[in-house]
């Protein structure tokens, strides 16, 4: 009998495979073998159990990805500061789900590979997958707070509940009882964040206006059973009222009342300029408003309509506000109706930016002026930037492809009527100030909609739709623009993250202005007018298709410093001609000269840009092309205007692109601009270019980052601006001559690490900022460095 040890050579090959894990054979687990010590901490999660379920809301706001959305055409990630995107949410084939609000909904297969996507105006979405897999969705933060979003299974939105795990309904909780709370047991740790709402207190009250514009359902109309999609209208949140209470509303499209169980009781379906309602029982109301009335709608208790007051929650009047902090804020914003004055201090002098919330020619945001030390130095009322399709349109510009004629006898009932000169047809779009505005004929091809300048050659005779059919004389025609040429206009001011809605002074360390709108599709304007005879399209502009979605954000973060971000999103195929996202007129001063210095530009049309130009007598249009660049491998990305002489610069204004961000990068601009990089107009206005002669397809997206900064320059340096975003400081240094040693001082930079990201004839002498500042050396004329500090 062999009493020796068993070695591997004695084992069958199947036994060896089982020991090494190369076989699917599993041994039985002995009773009691899985003990507490053998299960990893955290290994048993809710989804590993059969008795804990995920609640109704499948959207986990703690797992969102901020700063972008997923493009519906190909599943690509697109950077955009206004969007937040959900994590993967599992769905089964044919399982219906509803998202309370989203702009993009993306479907994936079981391996998380892109399948398809949907793009829509921000609002409710119901859909189902055609296979087992996952869904992600993106939310536009300009319209929706992701904290209130719900993803649930079913075909309608139900009452919101947070994302949470719950015990399975089959699990009984026995012997549960409520015990008395001991004194002091409810403290900061035992109360969940945001558990105490205004309704839970007796010292926080609502304004007389109980309509909250931040909680509307966008692009919806209310119905007796819920809501239907309808662009150009928004539906209010539920507004609860008690039996016998009376409320009065301003202009509404319709009004519905439901009991506390959500059953429809009564409604008013017709448009009302004022509507008073008394509740027959406890319940809630929903009303549909026109999109343009979002921030002017008022719902108040009582039967009288009083002066408008923005929705707000505030302290009860008898609550005393204690001693306030004496620490000053960087900015004060003074609101007076639609006028906003942003005040700060630069070099111990007041710097004031004045703007209008709805002051543009299209009814959106507009700059107005900049004042320094009580002196007007910048008239900025045309600094918001349009795009160029077949027309220059957006911002302060309307479509110019129109016929503008004196009105003889046409009235509102004739809007949408069609007229001809015997060759072409023209549609009556608007009647403004005694003038008729008619469309020119459009064509549509692979580049989208285009309109050539086609004026009528004879008096216009009636074709169809008019009530007053007398011919329209074409004498007295003049050039004009079609307003509005935009829809879905958003214009908001925030300070310290708080939306500014009330008149008065507001203080904080950061001011953010959001300016967003759709460029209306020319063809869609014309066809809408023809299909809605007797109605002015301007009243319903947000129900008309857009061709481009434009978003601009202006962030004032330090005295004189404004970071800008801009996006262009194609809603339809469109040809963009020379287009920019920044533009500005020249500085001005009543007694001092204004000079302009432009980076990386040689001589254009006889103007030598390598040295500062006195703008007093400047009157030449200079289009900067590749042959005009000092370094033809890089575009011109900035310029500086300054008031005073080279040895005594009073203040400077600089505008440009952040050269390492998205489509503002040198490589992107060189690729997207075949000809003109910058247009310095004879009017002294400055027009940079980001896209030129480029066909955009639906879903194409571009994002640009720039700056509009005022600063006190170093007298011996042409440009010494420091611009910042959330990730880094960018220091722009432009010099005229060689120097063995220079240092740009700024105490806020001390200790930061430096990276030279663009230069010519420029040597960075230290990788870290010390007490002397940013130390550098220059060689040759027109040396420069762009230094990034973190």
Image (cartoon, rainbow, N blue to C red):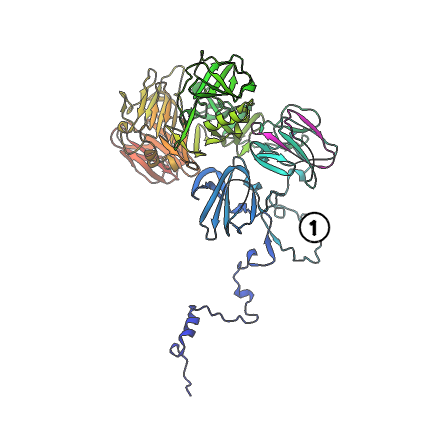
Q: Is residue 450 magenta?
A: no
Front-lying residue, 544 or 770:
544
- Which residue position is annotated with label 1? 182
* Left or right: 701, with 49 as reference point: left
Rendered image quadrant of residue 614:
top left
Q: Residue at x 53, y 70 (%)?
A: 29
Rendered image quadrant of residue 196:
top right
**Viewer can see residue 26:** yes
Instruction: Name the quadrant of the N terminus.
Output: bottom left
Which stretch is magenta? 269-292
Alpha-carbon neighbours of circle 1 within 10 Å: few (<14), some, or many (≥20)? few
Front-lying residue, 383 or 312:
383
How many badges with numbers are in the image? 1
Give the secondary structure at mark 1.
loop
Q: Is residue 272 magenta?
A: yes
Front-lying residue, 185 or 401:
401
């Amino acid at each position: 009998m062999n009493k020796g040890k068993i070695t591997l050579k004695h084992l069958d090959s199947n036994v060896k495979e089982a020991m090494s894990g190369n076989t699917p054979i599993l041994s039985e687990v002995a009773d009691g073998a899985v003990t507490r010590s053998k299960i990893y901490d955290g290994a048993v999660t809710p989804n590993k159990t059969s008795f804990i379920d995920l609640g109704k809301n499948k959207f986990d706001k703690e797992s969102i990805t901020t700063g972008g959305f997923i493009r519906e055409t190909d599943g690509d990630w697109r950077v955009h500061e206004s969007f937040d995107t959900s994590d993967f949410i599992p769905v089964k084939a044919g399982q219906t789900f509803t998202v309370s609000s989203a702009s993009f909904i993306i479907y994936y297969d079981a391996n998380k590979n892109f399948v398809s996507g949907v793009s829509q105006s921000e609002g409710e979405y119901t859909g189902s997958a055609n296979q087992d897999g996952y869904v992600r969705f993106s939310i536009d933060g300009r319209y929706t707070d992701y904290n209130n979003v719900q993803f649930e299974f079913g075909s309608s939105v139900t009452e919101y509940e947070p994302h949470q795990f719950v015990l399975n309904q089959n699990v009984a909780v026995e012997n549960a009882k409520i015990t008395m709370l001991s004194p002091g047991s409810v403290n900061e740790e035992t109360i969940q964040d945001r558990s105490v709402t205004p309704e839970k207190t007796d010292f926080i009250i609502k304004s007389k206006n109980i309509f909250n514009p931040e909680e509307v359902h966008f692009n919806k109309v209310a119905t007796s059973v819920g809501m239907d999609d309808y662009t150009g209208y928004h539906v209010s949140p539920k507004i609860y009222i008690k039996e016998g209470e009376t409320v009065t509303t301003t202009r509404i499209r319709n009004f519905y009342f439901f009991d506390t169980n959500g059953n429809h009781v009564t409604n008013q379906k017709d448009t009302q300029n004022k509507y008073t309602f008394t509740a027959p029982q406890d319940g809630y109301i929903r009303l549909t408003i026109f999109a343009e009335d979002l921030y002017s709608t008022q719902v108040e208790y009582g039967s009288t309509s009083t002066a408008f007051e923005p929705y707000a929650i505030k302290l009860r009047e008898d609550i005393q506000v204690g001693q306030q902090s004496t620490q000053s804020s960087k900015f004060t914003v003074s609101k007076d109706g639609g006028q906003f004055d942003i005040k700060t201090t630069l070099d111990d002098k007041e710097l004031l930016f004045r703007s209008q919330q709805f002051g543009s020619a299209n009814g959106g945001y507009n700059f107005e002026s900049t004042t320094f030390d009580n002196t007007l130095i910048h008239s900025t009322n045309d600094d918001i930037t349009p795009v160029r399709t077949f027309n220059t349109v957006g911002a302060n510009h309307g479509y110019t492809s129109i016929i503008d004629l004196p009105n003889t006898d046409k009235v509102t009932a004739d809007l949408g009527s069609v007229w001809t000169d015997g060759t072409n047809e023209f549609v009556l779009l608007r009647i403004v100030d005694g003038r008729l505005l008619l469309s020119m004929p459009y064509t549509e091809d692979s580049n989208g909609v285009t309109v050539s300048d086609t004026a009528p050659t004879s008096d216009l005779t009636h074709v169809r739709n008019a009530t007053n059919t007398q011919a329209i004389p074409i004498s007295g025609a003049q050039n004009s623009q079609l307003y509005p040429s935009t829809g879905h206009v958003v214009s908001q001011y925030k300070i310290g993250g708080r939306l500014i809605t009330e008149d008065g002074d507001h203080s904080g360390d950061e001011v953010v202005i959001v300016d967003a709108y759709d460029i209306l599709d020319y063809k869609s304007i014309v066809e809408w007018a023809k299909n809605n005879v007797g109605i002015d399209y301007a009243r319903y502009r947000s129900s008309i298709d857009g061709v481009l979605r434009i978003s601009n954000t202006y962030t004032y973060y330090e005295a004189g410093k404004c970071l800008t971000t801009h996006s262009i999103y194609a809603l339809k195929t469109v040809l963009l001609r020379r287009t920019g996202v920044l533009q500005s007129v020249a500085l001005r001063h009543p007694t001092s000269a204004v000079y302009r210095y432009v980076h990386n530009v040689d001589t254009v049309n006889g103007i030598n840009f390598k040295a500062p130009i006195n703008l007093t007598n400047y009157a030449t249009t200079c289009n900067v092309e590749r042959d005009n660049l000092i370094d033809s491998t890089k575009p011109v990305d900035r310029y500086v205007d300054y008031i005073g002489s080279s040895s005594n610069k009073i203040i400077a204004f600089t505008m440009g692109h952040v050269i390492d961000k998205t489509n503002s990068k040198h490589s992107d601009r060189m690729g997207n601009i075949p000809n003109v990089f910058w247009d310095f107009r004879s009017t002294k206005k400055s027009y940079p270019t980001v896209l030129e002669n480029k066909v955009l397809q639906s879903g194409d997206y571009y994002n640009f980052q720039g700056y509009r900064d005022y600063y006190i320059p170093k007298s011996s340096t042409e440009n010494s601006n420091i611009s910042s975003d959330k990730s880094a400081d960018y220091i722009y240094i432009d010099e005229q001559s060689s120097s063995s040693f220079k240092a740009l001082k700024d105490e806020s930079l001390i200790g930061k690490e430096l990276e030279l990201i663009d230069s010519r004839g420029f040597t960075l002498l230290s990788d870290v900022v010390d007490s002397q500042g940013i130390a550098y050396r220059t060689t040759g004329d027109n040396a420069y460095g762009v230094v990034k500090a973190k």
